[in-house]
Image: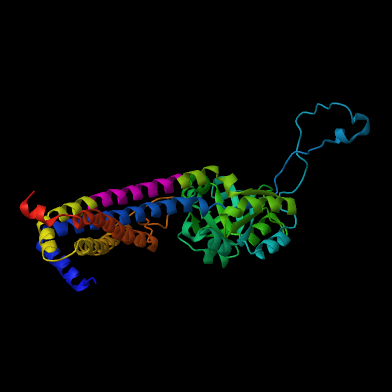
Amino acid sequence: MINWKVILNIAKTHLITKRKSTVTAALGVTFGIAAYITLVSFMTGLNQMLDSLILNQTPHIHLYNEIKPSVEQPVALYEPFKNSVNMVHSIKPKQGQQKIHNALPILHYLKNNKEVKGATPQLRAQIFYLSGSIELGGNLIGVDVMEEARLSNMGDYIVGGSPEALKNTDNGILLGAGLASKMSLAVGDRVQVSTVRGDVFPLKIVGIYQSGIADIDNVQSYANLKTVQRILGEAQNYITDIKIKLFDIEKAPTMAENLVSQFKVTATDINQANAQFETGSNIRNLITYAVSITLLIVAGFGIYNILNMLIYEKMKDIAILKATGFSGTDVQLIFMSQAMIIGVSGGTLGLIIGYVFSRLIDRVPFETEALPTITTYPINYNIAYYVIGISFALLSTFIAGWLPASKAKRIDPVRIIRGT
């Protein structure tokens, strides 16, 4: 029967008497795990930030009514020319509206779909921004601002205002940051917008929208959907775009195909709109995990070397233990206990240091126009990384202790005492 009390006392005595070796082994575990926690938290945090730049501003599915040239020209419908070869140049698209037909029933259907997280209507209008003698062409997009804030984190890109301010102001506008800079306008000022027909409407600036993309911020602004419908003189069912967010982004291509056949609209899923997104995201994640695994493996070899040397320094102690009646299994358990004590203490300290380093990085100032509300470097505090860290510390120290301890189990004490 194994006497664990005696075995643990001997293991404790060995660790205390060889403090330098014990501390070195524990620090090898500590800094290996701390470096892993810090690196993986920082890299995955950056990856999430980069992914959010695409996911926040790109719907999973975009519905709209695309203007296309007519498949058949009138001459092809004329019976005498049925079997003739028609050479028609400069085919023009047929006249049609940009609005989505039956947009409100489609929205109702989408909002009741269990796979849909949310669907928001939009109305895009070509306008001119007027401020004094300055006249700039651009776009005004009518939105349900609170739904946009919920589904696409629109509030993260609003500086000097809020989504609520736009919701509560019928004649309000979220002016693009580039437009505001060019026209020297700020929150609280008024800007006039003119439609292509020449109608002029005054709007109050309730916020500045900064996407971080200059080509967008120089031309694009947002207003309430009803406000833009009123500016264009259209009815409440006049909607040009529907942006859809799903619970599972992987289902976007399939649902887009179904919506095209069901409602006869044009649908673009996120894979089509951002073909490079998935590739870039997968490569960044692959690099992150490859570096993390490599770091853990290197730390594991370091732990093994340190514990291996620690056990070989104890050869005489092993001989004495066996000479006094301890079995090979007892000797193995003693050194395995030392390894696990080092693994638990070093791994726990590594998690604490890794968390502290992550918190320090999280406080480092970081400014980017792409995400104006982010002020420090992003860190991912996923608890799974800490579970992986402590699990690897225990596993690596177990293996690093088991291999040399198995050799110690088979050592002949007479040979060691004789010095042979």
Q: In this view, does 70 lie to the left or right of 257?
A: right
Work out whether 255 lies above or below 88: below
- As drawn, 15 above or below 46: below
Residue 11 at x, y = what percent?
Answer: 17, 65
**145 versus 278 height, above or below:** below
Q: In this view, does 241 lie to the left or right of 391?
A: right
Question: Which of 309 and 48 lies nearest the eye of the viewer?
Answer: 309
Q: Which residue is drawn at 63% across and 48% down?
A: 268
The one nearer the camera, 410 or 102, is 410
**Picture quarter with the N terminus:** bottom left
Residue 236 visible from this viewpoint: no
Instruction: Provide residue 19's location: percent of width, then percent of height.
Output: 11, 61
Q: Which residue lies furthest to the left in this view?
A: 418
Tell me which segment is drawn in magenta: 283-303
User: Residue, x 19% and y 56% (percent of image)?
Assistant: 408
Q: Where is residue 337 in the image (x, y as percent from the top left)?
A: 22, 64
Q: In this orientation, which residue lies closer to the viewer: 186 or 4?
A: 4
Q: Looking at this rendering, what residue extends furthest in the right direction? A: 80
Does the magenta run of residues contain 298? yes
The main secondary structure of the magenta stretch is helix
Would residue 57 be seen by someone viewing this image from the given angle?
A: yes
Residue 3 lies left or right of residue 213; in this view the side is left
Residue ID at (31%, 58%): 395
Of residues 372 and 138, the one nearer the viewer is: 372
Please state the horizontal and vertical placement of residue 31, each as a whole percent of the image. 24, 55
Quarter of image, res 191:
bottom right
Residue ID at (10%, 61%) = 320
Q: Is residue 57 left or right of residue 324?
A: right
